[in-house]
Image (spheres, rainbow, N blue to C red):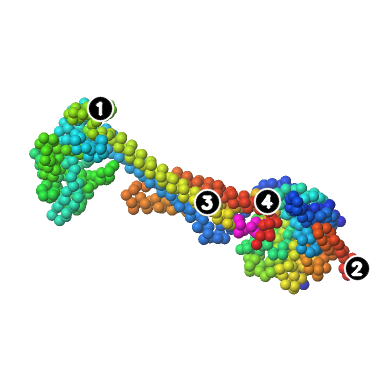
């Protein structure tokens, strides 16, 4: 019989039974084998493995994108700090008791108050701002709802607006209520395209103005889109666009007064002086003054706090999705252990120790989460870049976030893989072999 | 001859408190190196329990079990795994091969669980291939179990049982899932191994299969009921 011939042709050494087995020979099986066994386990159910990884992919991707967004926001804020100069004080009407606009009986911030503010020791420059929304026409284009900013000649220096073409209006033109306009970059583009806007006429509401300057591109700073404004002398704005019935008695209302403070000046002291003077002229106590006086830093801090809240929220979302991903892995690993009870029994019968089995399933869980983590990193980096390009938000991919995300994925694998692996390791070989 | 298996008053009791089942009730057996022994008995007689203890898958409640002179009755799970890995080869009724894993990888399995430093991957593969060739399946090394016939699968299982060069081969109803002709083929393979000096203990409920062995131990109610020893005369 052929089988017999084959058997006898192989030299099977007679077993040596003189040496008992060293039952204390602990140690782990070769790492390459463990990796191979784990990989076989993952590769056996490709679709399931991919779905299991999805949680980790989303979690890791979310961590990276979240950090990219907050890093982008922080970069924007720090540029604003540099761009605006920190020695600016904003005095705004309203925002006292009774919310924006305040009570009708509250004193208002008027144009003449700027003189008071300018007189305070330490104030080196002032600008006033009052806004109205107007329809603006050139020969070919009509723009509706454009914010028209009435202001004073120092506005460009106080608010760091560069004039890229032409010039801003001067004191004489302010006094004469000259019909002049300075367009922001974006408005100039929309009205005149590639044409030179200087010297052109535009119609604001029903009044014709001559364009004498264009502001350089600036972008969005705080809540203001500096590229969609039109500037004009505030006296003209009061006269033509915001006629107030009682202006002669009560003065023209302004939205905001900017005061630029000397570098070395004591900011607190200057603010107190301004408050005292305003309180004096309005005939109210300093505590009852219905004006908000903020420094540049106050505004940046407010915005920073918002960013931090936003970042915390995103961190929670990312954390929760990693947690859900980990639970997904644990779930599938538990199913897998049950499904492969027989396999575990076979391995145990040929000499796999509980540690060998534990290591196999733990490695499988870690492998799932690490492969998921790698895919998640790709998703996060690509997603972060795309998000930055397609939305208003700026994103900066932080290299550390990649390590953080990968580390969390590994931790998730170890943490959520341990319980199923332990369950597998504790199976009884006889029960496991009998499992159908 | 040295005793491969020696049990002293082996007992296994299941259940706690009032109701106790004595699966093994004082079993004394001795099996010498090179013997081919069949274990028979009706279901519930304790033959599976005996197999599990002899195969170092389980421990006795009381009594002693010496495997090749080494007392293994009180070893823990890890130590028993070491014994199974190095001294025992299993052949099961339902083959128990890993699915979607090549015959070669299946045969290599016991070698994988040897501690490191023993064999390189190349050595393991060579050894597994030699074992497959020994059962006449050298040309099927790359096939998965589902691409093999029942007889071939059982031969892969036999190769796996041989690859670690065990001192004892445990066969649990090795022909139970096979037709008569294939079953006889497998018995021939086992007889040949026996002829090469292997010690084989086989559980079976088929008397004609048991007859092929030289000795039959019959268990009833957890006790050795009867021993048939093939005399030299009968063997001829």
- Measure the C-alpha gap from mark 1 to mark 4: 78 Å
- Would residue A160 be visible to someone looking at this image? no
Q: Residue at x 18, y 40 (%)?
A: A130
Determine whether label 3 and label 1 are within 8 Å by CB.
no
Chain letter for mark 3: A
Q: Which residue position holds label 2? A: B233
Q: Which residue position holds label 1? A: A272
- Measure the C-alpha gap from mark 3 to mark 1: 58 Å
Percent across and percent down for residue B44 are: 77, 61
Question: Which element is circle 4 on?
Answer: loop
Residue A353 left/right relative to B204? left
Question: Which element is circle 3 on?
Answer: helix
Chain letter for mark 1: A
Chain letter for mark 4: A
Residue farthest to the right, as pictured: B233
Tell me the magenta residue range: A337-346
Determine whether label 1 and label 4 are within 8 Å by CB.
no
**What numbered label is drawn on residue B63?**
none
Determine whether label 4 and label 2 are within 8 Å by CB.
no
Q: Compare residues A44 and A312 and report the one nearer the observer.
A: A312
Sequence-first disc among 3 and 4: 3
Disc 3 packing (10 Å; few <14; some 14–19; many ≥20)? many
Percent across and percent down for residue A408 are: 50, 46
Q: Which residue position holds label 3? A: A327
Q: Disc 2 vs disc 1: which is toward the camera?
A: 1
Q: Which residue position holds label 4? A: A353
């Amino acid at each position: 019989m052929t089988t017999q011939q084959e058997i006898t042709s192989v030299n099977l050494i007679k077993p040596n039974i003189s040496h008992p087995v060293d039952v204390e020979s602990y140690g782990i099986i070769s790492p390459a084998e463990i990796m191979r066994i784990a990989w076989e386990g993952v590769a056996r159910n490709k679709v399931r493995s991919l779905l299991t990884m999805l949680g980790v992919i989303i979690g890791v991707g979310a961590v990276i994108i979240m950090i990219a967004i907050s890093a982008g926001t922080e970069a924007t804020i720090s540029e604003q700090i540099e761009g605006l100069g920190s020695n600016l004080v904003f005095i705004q009407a309203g925002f006292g008791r009774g919310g924006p606009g305040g009570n009708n009986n509250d004193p208002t911030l008027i144009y003449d108050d700027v003189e008071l503010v300018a007189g305070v020791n330490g104030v080196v420059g002032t600008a006033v701002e009052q806004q109205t929304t107007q329809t603006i026409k050139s020969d070919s284009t009509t723009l509706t709802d454009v914010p028209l900013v009435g202001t004073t000649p120092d506005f460009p220096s106080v608010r760091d607006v560069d004039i890229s073409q032409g010039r801003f209006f001067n004191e004489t033109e302010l006094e004469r209520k000259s019909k002049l306009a300075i367009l922001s970059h974006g408005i100039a583009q929309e009205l005149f395209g590639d044409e030179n806007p200087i010297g052109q006429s535009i119609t604001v509401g029903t009044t014709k103005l001559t364009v004498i300057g264009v502001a350089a591109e600036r972008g969005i700073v705080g809540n203001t889109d500096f590229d969609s404004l039109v500037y004009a002398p505030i006296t003209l704005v009061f006269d033509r666009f915001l006629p107030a019935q009682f202006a002669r008695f009560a003065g023209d209302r302004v939205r905001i007064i900017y005061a630029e403070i000397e570098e070395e000046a004591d900011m607190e002291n200057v603010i107190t002086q301004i408050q005292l003077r305003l309180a004096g002229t309005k005939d109210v106590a300093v505590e009852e003054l219905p004006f908000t006086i903020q420094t540049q830093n106050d505004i940046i801090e407010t915005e920073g706090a918002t960013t931090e809240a936003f970042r915390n929220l995103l961190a929670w979302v990312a954390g929760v999705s990693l947690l859900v991903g980990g639970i997904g892995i644990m779930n599938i690993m538990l199913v897998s252990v049950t499904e492969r009870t027989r396999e575990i029994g076979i391995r145990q019968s040929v000499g796999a120790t509980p540690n060998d089995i534990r290591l196999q399933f733990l490695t499988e869980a870690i492998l799932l989460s690490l492969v998921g983590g790698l895919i998640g990193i790709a998703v996060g980096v690509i997603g972060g870049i795309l998000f930055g390009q397609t939305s208003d938000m700026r994103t900066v991919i932080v290299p550390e976030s990649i390590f953080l995300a990968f580390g969390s994925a590994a931790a998730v694998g170890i943490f959520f893989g341990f319980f199923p692996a332990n369950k597998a390791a504790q199976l009884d070989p006889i029960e496991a072999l009998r499992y159908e | 001859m040295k005793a491969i298996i020696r049990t002293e008053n082996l007992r296994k009791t299941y259940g706690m408190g009032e109701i106790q089942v004595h699966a093994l009730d004082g079993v004394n057996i001795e099996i010498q190196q090179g013997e081919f022994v069949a274990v028979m008995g009706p279901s519930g007689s304790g033959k599976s329990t005996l197999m599990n203890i002899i195969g170092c898958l389980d421990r006795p409640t009381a009594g002693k079990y010496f495997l090749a002179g080494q007392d293994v009755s009180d070893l823990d799970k890890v130590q028993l795994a070491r014994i199974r890995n190095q001294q025992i080869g299993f052949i099961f009724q339902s083959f128990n091969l890993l699915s979607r894993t090549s015959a070669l990888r299946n045969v290599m399995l016991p070698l994988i669980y040897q501690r490191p430093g023993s064999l390189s991957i190349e050595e393991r593969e060579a050894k597994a291939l030699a074992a497959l060739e020994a059962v006449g399946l050298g040309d099927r090394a790359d096939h998965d179990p589902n691409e093999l016939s029942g007889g071939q699968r059982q031969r892969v299982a036999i190769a796996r049982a041989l690859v670690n060069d065990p001192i004892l081969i445990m066969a649990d109803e090795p022909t139970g899932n096979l037709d008569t002709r294939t079953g006889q083929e497998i018995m021939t393979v086992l007889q040949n191994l026996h002829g090469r000096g292997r010690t084989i203990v086989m559980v079976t409920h088929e008397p004609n299969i048991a007859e092929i062995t030289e000795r039959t131990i019959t268990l009833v109610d957890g006790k050795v009921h009867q021993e048939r020893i093939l005399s030299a005369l009968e063997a001829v």
